Image: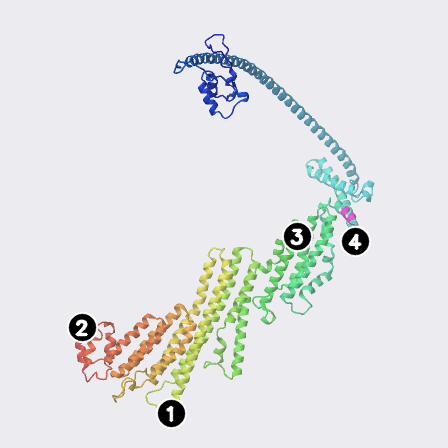
Amino acid sequence: MKERSKSSSASNLPLILDIDDFKGDFSFDALFGNLVNELLPAFQEEEADTADGHGIGGTDVLPNGHIRAPSGATKFPQGLSAPLFPEVDALLSLFEDSCRELVDLRKQIDGKLYNLKKEVSTQDAKHRKTLTELEKGVDGLFDSFARLDSRISSVGQTAAKIGDHLQSADAQRETASQTIELIKYLMEFNSSLGDLMELSPLFSDDSRVAEAASIAQKLRSFAGEDIARAVPSVVGSVTASRVLEVAVANLQEYCNELENRLLARFDAASQRRELSTMSECAKILSQFNRGTSAMQHYVATRPMFIDVEVMNSDTRLVLGSQGSQASPSNVARGLSSLYKEITDTIRKEAATIMAVFPSPNDVMSILVQRVLEQRVTTLLDKLLLKPSLVNPPPIEEGGLLLYLRMLAVAYEKTQELARDLRAVGCGDLDVEGLTECLFSVHKDEYPEHEQASLRQLYQAKLEELRAESQKVSESSGTIGRSKGASVASSHQPISIAVVTEFVRWNEEAISRCTSFSSQPATLAANVKSVFTCLLDQVSQYITDGLEWARDSLIEAAALRERFVLGTIVSRRVAAAAASAAEAAAAAGESSFRSFMVAVQRCGSSVAIVQQYFANSISRLLLPVDGAYAASCEEMATAMSSAEGAAYKGLQQCIETVMAEVERLLSAEQKATDYCSPDDGMAPDHRPTNACTRVVAYLSRVLEAAFTALEGLNKQAFLTELGNRLHKGLLVHWQKFTFNPSGGLRLKRDITEYGEFVRSFNAPSVDEKFELLGILANVFIVAPESLSTLFEGTPSIRKDAQRFIQLREDYKSAKLASRLSSLWSSSS
């Protein structure tokens, strides 16, 4: 801001504001302060008091950077009072001047902006004009480039066509030259048939044999094509064709002679191991039928195919010495050694083939095929002699199982050989498919042999068990049961070890099925047929075992029937009969235990088969729709015969138990047990001897049933036995007469029986014995109280009528007439 004089209204005063005041960090407060500082000392002093810093030499530095000069305080003459705001006029003048200068400054700025806009517009127009001219120039340049590119392309295409024509002309010239040369050679071969003496030195020079072979092949091709194009209807063509036939025949004779000469040279080089000469001969021979003769000749001359001792050595290594029985394990070791030797030999041959032949893959394919079809097939034919299913080899010589094991070992080891040969290299040969073909004749009838083997093993095992049983019977001096030794030899007790052996046979057969069957459907069919054999074997075996156990029950029943006596016998006969009855009872108890053991082993055998099916069979059947469900159904059907035998045997067990219960009750129960004389003695509250004997017998004999039976089978058996026991006791007690003390004794017996049958866990049986306890009260209460006994249980009224008739005082108390009126009134 510029300095100004106090007379601010003068027109020639310096400027108050400058355009520089508005540059930089503009502050209106600083601008205003600079304007009024000289006119308002008080404002200046206040600013000085509150300022943060002072200038040098007593000057103040304003915020906009201007320096404000110090001014003394304005003094008024003494005696005059200062006006209220004396600087107002000066300020107004200052503000007016400032506003005018601001207007002037704005006009200056507007003028400059206008000039700048005008100048910018002019420059922009010039720039746009320049850009337009440049775009036109660039478009013209692009058009020029396009025309140039088109011209270059056209020239290039023309040059390419010229080059093609030149190349074609050169090729035609070369072909014509070669054709002329070939015609010259062809004329040499077109002399008399079989005359090869006048040929060019080229065809007899051993150093140029490769060139001669190439030209000979070209001549054969040329002559053959010419004969094919000849038209028989044209006489000249026919004559030309006949002439060329002479040339072709001579060429064929020469090629044969040349090929034989090269093969002889190849053989000589092969014996000296001169790979370079062999390679040269093989390369030349590749022009004759693609070298097939050389490849086949090389393979056929390998020692492993022409040396008879090699074949004999293979047989001895795998089958052992002549006359000895080879085992699968020895055969496996022999095959492993032999196939390793074959693989090593082919690996060595592969190195030679790679160095000699131009098409080594084709030679390897021929070599590997020859090995499999000759060396391996010859060995397999000696090793795998397919047995007859009508007259199979005896089990003592290994049976069908030995053949199947040999087949599995040979198949596995030959598959390993195929994989090893594939790794060594066999060209395009399908070595795996060829290996499968080697075993196709055996795999076609494999399922039938596997099933026949399982049946043979089963029959052999049964014969072994019968022989052991017969030996045991002879050593003990007995011939079995009453039915004789024939029965003892037809049925055998069930053995878990035998069933486990059946499963082991089947598991081995399933492993062979898995190895021989690659398709899921074929595998499932074979597995299903093999598993069906196991079901038939186990079903027949456990059914026979149950029948064997049933035979003892039947024999025990026959012994009981044999010693049933009449009512009038002598004391000696009765004693002998009682002793025999005891023996029959012991036989019955033993047969009961034997059958329960058989049932338990039967259940264990079925569980073993089911577990085997779940672990090993099901996963092989699941991929084929319906196979799993069909096998489950077959398993249920196969076990139905065993279930039928078990059901019949359990019924016979109940008959055996009840027969002994009836015998004990008949022998041990006394009339005085329930109708003791009134001798003044205290009543006996113990169970009767017959009850004690029966409960002890049942506890002893049913221990085997509790162990052998499980689940619903156990519940059904014990429920049926409890019902039969209840019925038998009712029939037994109706043979006696009861007085009140006898009724108490009977009630004690019923409590004893009830506590025992509670271990059956059969609610219906428990309820029946509870009702028996209520029925026993008819012997205890006074006659006039009988009507009140059955008010809550009318269902036992019929049994109660029969029981009441057994009261000692039934006639003396005239209970018949009393009860008839009671029943009629209640009904």
The alpha-carbon separation of the residues under discs 3 and 4 comes to 28 Å
- Is 491 placed left or right of 363 in the picture? left
Task: List the residue tagged with mark 3.
Answer: 423
The alpha-carbon separation of the residues under discs 3 and 1 comes to 94 Å
Instruction: Tell me the SS state at disc 3.
Output: helix
Q: Are marks 2 and 1 in contact (CB under 8 Å)?
A: no
Q: Which of marks 3 and 1 is nearer the N terminus?
A: 3
**Three-letter amino acid code at the position of disc 3:** Ala
Check the image and report above or below for 42 versus 427: above
Label 3, residues with CA under 10 Å away: few <14, some 14-19, many ≥20: few
210 inside magenta stretch: no
Magenta part of the chain: 270-281
Q: Earlier in the sequence, mark 3 or mark 4?
A: 4
Q: Residue 762, position in %: x, y?
A: 34, 71
Instruction: Tell me the SS state at disc 2.
Output: helix
Q: From this viewpoint, is residue 659 visible? A: no
**Three-letter amino acid code at the position of disc 1:** Arg
Residue 826 is tagged as 2
Task: List the residue tagged with mark 1.
Answer: 572
Q: Which of 148 and 684 is in front in this view?
A: 684
Mark 4 or mark 2, whichever is nearer to me: 2
Residue 271 is tagged as 4
